[in-house]
Amino acid sequence: MFPVNMAETEQSSGSSHEDGKPPNPVDFNFMVPKKEISMVPDMGKWKRSQAYADYIGFILTLNEGVKGKKLTCEYQVSETVEKLLAMLGTLDRWIDETPPVDQPSRFGNKAYRTWYAKLDQEAEALVTAVLPSERHDAAPEIAVYLKESVGNSTRIDYGTGHEAAFAAFLCCLCKVGALRMEDQLAIIFKVFDKYLQVMRKLQKTYRMEPAGSQGVWGLDDFQFLPFIWGSSQLIDHPTLEPRHFVEEKVVNEYHQDYMFLECIKFINEMKTGPFAEHSNQLWNISAVPSWSKVNQGLVRMYKAECLEKFPVIQHFKFGSLLSIQPVKP
């Protein structure tokens, strides 16, 4: 999606780069995103939509960008990326300021609702601070995806639909030109990685339930994208093969460099008993011969298990940036 968007951005602006300013992004009529998929037959509308094409294009462009690269490699960090990290730092600090309350039920601590109410109130201001000044008008639209990306305050749960909202949030920032082609590595290695840290802290602190969990038959209770991008990082690794990630020693040694292993480390901390029992799908993946096969398989699985599942997509919201309109032929 980056290249298409960048090309659009270049063409639509009459100005040159000589004045040192980036070109004006495409003109959008910003709107507050809303749900459009209310029944199973609407799923065809989603799969034909510009939003679906943009979203999957974004995921796959980033998947290609991180191929064979470590989290600790060198890459540029733009001002927008720094602002996004500060924003996520604020969400993190609010968790510290909102300790769990005493309650009879072990799961779904109600203090999460207090934390969420603060985000609900502040989201637009947080997003405005991230956007360049000439794009502040996009804040109400983009802020919706940020609010959707941290879990559900009624059910106190979190799942891949919430994770998808954060990817959609990042995709929107690219579409308005706040994030650029050269931010690719920082988007995953800095911003998405920090987002995962904050989500894990939320999940642990407030004992959030997995949303629509398939139990041991799902890939993971909470996340999916870091397994896709994380497996791409490991493609053509000289020594690490898929069979190694079930070994704790390997995970402890390499998790700082690879997102996939960070995810495994978190699972190992949160779950007890044999890995093959609590994470059966991942155990099966460890038998796949190469990381490129793992990566291709996970992309297929993501489309089938997340993007083509009505219970996940019924919550997705569409606006001017991620549009329900069909892709133009």
Image (cartoon, rainbow, N blue to C red):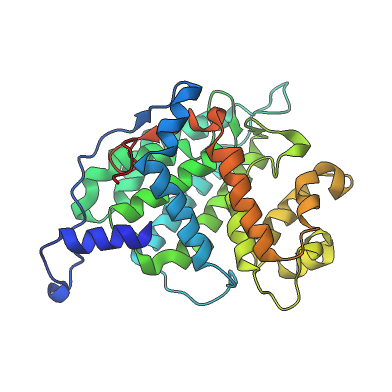
Q: Nearer the viewer, residue 249 or 36?
A: 36
**Residue 275 horizontal/vertical position (percent):** 84, 49
Q: Is residue 272 left or right of residue 226?
A: right
Q: Is residue 282 visible?
A: yes
Q: Is residue 227 left or right of residue 323?
A: right
Q: Is residue 30 left or right of residue 204?
A: left
Give the residue drawn at x 43%, y 48%.
55
**Residue 134 horizontal/vertical position (percent):** 18, 53
**Residue 35 horizontal/vertical position (percent):** 39, 27
- Relative to 17, is 201 above or below? above
Residue extending farthest left: 14
The quarter of the picture where residue 151 lies is: top right
Q: Is residue 255 visible?
A: no
The quarter of the picture where residue 140 lies is: top left
Give the residue drawn at x 32%, y 43%.
125
Q: Nearer the viewer, residue 186 or 218?
A: 218
- Relative to 191, is 52 above or below? above
Q: Quadrant of the N terminus?
A: bottom left
**Residue 89 horizontal/vertical position (percent):** 48, 53
Give the residue drawn at x 33%, y 33%.
33
Give the residue drawn at x 63%, y 59%.
295
Residue extending farthest front: 329
- Relative to 100, is 166 above or below? below
Label total for image:
0
